[in-house]
Image (cartoon, rainbow, N blue to C red):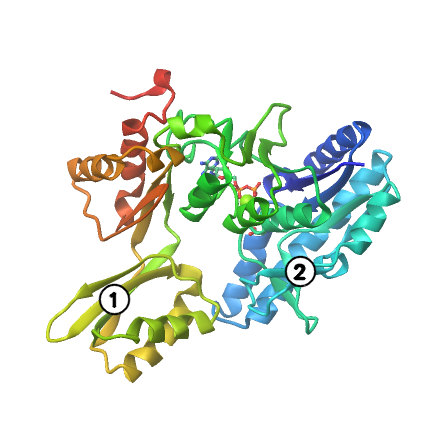
Amino acid sequence: MPILVHKYGGTSMADVERIMSNARRVATDIEKGYQVAVVVSAMSGETNRLLGLADQIDPHGSGRERDMLASAGEQVSIALMAMALQKVGYDAISFTAPQAGIKTDPFHTRAKIVSIDDRRIHDVLDRGKVAVVAGFQGITEDMEVTTLGRGASDTTAAALAASLGAERCDIYTDVDGVYAADPRIVKGAKKLARVSYDEMLEMAGAGSKVLQTRSVVFAKKYKVPLQVLTSFENKPGTLISEEVKEMEEILVTGVCSDKTEARITLRGIPDQPGIAAQVFKEVNNRGISVDMIIQSMGEDGLANMSFTVTRADLNDAIQAVEGVSKTLNAKGFTVDEKIAKVSVVGVGMKSQSGVAARMFEILAEKGINIYMISTSEIKISVVIHEDYTDAAVRSLAQEFDLVEETLQSD
Ligand code: ADP
Ligand code: ASP
Ligand code: MG
């Protein structure tokens, strides 16, 4: 029988009525002949509440204990969801991530899934039951509970869908699809019917937090179509799949912003081979991902190097840089948290040029200074002062025709 994975986010799990409604939705797909595995998030606001308690004791406290605490949110949800399914007449069994065989690396609060032993889940599905799996959590080789980063129930769902060979992974959320810009920032942003994996990867990586980036990595690698849709209504959402020809005709598919990064600048480092390797080896050894990097010429054989990391990793990154700064006899380093990354994404950029020029012109017209620029084949990102984020996103959405005509401002 074909398998579907349903994922319900926090808002979709907010109360018992929502959970019952999700159970009925699962039932509909079972009646259509699917085996369904359900991945759930913690109830709306719960992860923030739990981590808020931890912060009151020590915001830089043990990652192990933060994970033990935060993973509790999803454990509540799986049991409630399984009960709701039983109530509507379907056999269902809840699984924490360790029970579901979701193994991760040992980096607490940002662990990555390394394997899924899905035998128990398959077995439950084959016996005609619904498997309800906790999102966001994992377990290491050493039986330590980990979490996979904020928003990572999407990743659990996509990884499980890949592992189970699911026909599709349906991500139920509080928006009815992926929009060309965050609808909270751009009123009247266009809804996208289809997005390619690569575009969604870039959009998610650039701050479009409707999907966690790694969920798209799994979906792309294992060719699992993802669908983003609302759990509040019955209507089609956005399909994320392989690129099709028509997608290339659109120059810019989306504009996104990200205020979760910080910039570190190492000043006065030797301008010679091996220095970048040394800096980023230190950072990488702590499991920290770096986003943008620029190196600029300084004076007297010395250079400056700036890079961005997520603010959640900033303390660890500072520790890494402190060490390397001493070893390299650098002039020091600075940290800037008041930055934002604004990006435009579209596969159409592969075949048409001029997007960067138009983007920089719009920002110039608004008097917005650009600190860093990075480009890929289908994305252009700039780092600016965070105060200008929404203004930049709105102007770019207008410029690249991403707003419904009736709602365009003059
Ligand atoms: P969930 O709790 O279901 O995982 P999230 O809050 O993580 O939901 O993701 C859904 C939210 O993502 C939406 O409410 C929306 O504000 C935001 N969002 C950001 N960018 C976009 C976009 N381009 N399209 C749709 N939603 C977006
Ligand atoms: N509950 C986790 C969070 O709030 C994971 C998720 O919702 O996807 O980040
Ligand atoms: Mg989410």
Compute the Cα span from label 1 to label 2: 36 Å
Disc number placed over residue 82 in the picture, else none: none
Vertical placement of residue 217 versus 84, above or below: below
| Camera-nearest residue between 291 and 51 | 291
| Camera-nearest residue between 371 and 282 | 282
The image quadrant that residue 315 belongs to is: bottom left
Percent of width and height locating residue 6: 68, 39
Element under label 1?
Answer: strand
Please state which amino acid type lies under the numbered disc 2: Ser
Residue lying at the far top of the rendered structure: 406
Please state which amino acid type lies under the numbered disc 1: Met
| 273 left or right of 85 in image | left
Element under label 2?
Answer: strand
| Camera-nearest residue between 274 and 112 | 274
Percent of width and height locating residue 248: 40, 30
The residue under label 1 is: 305
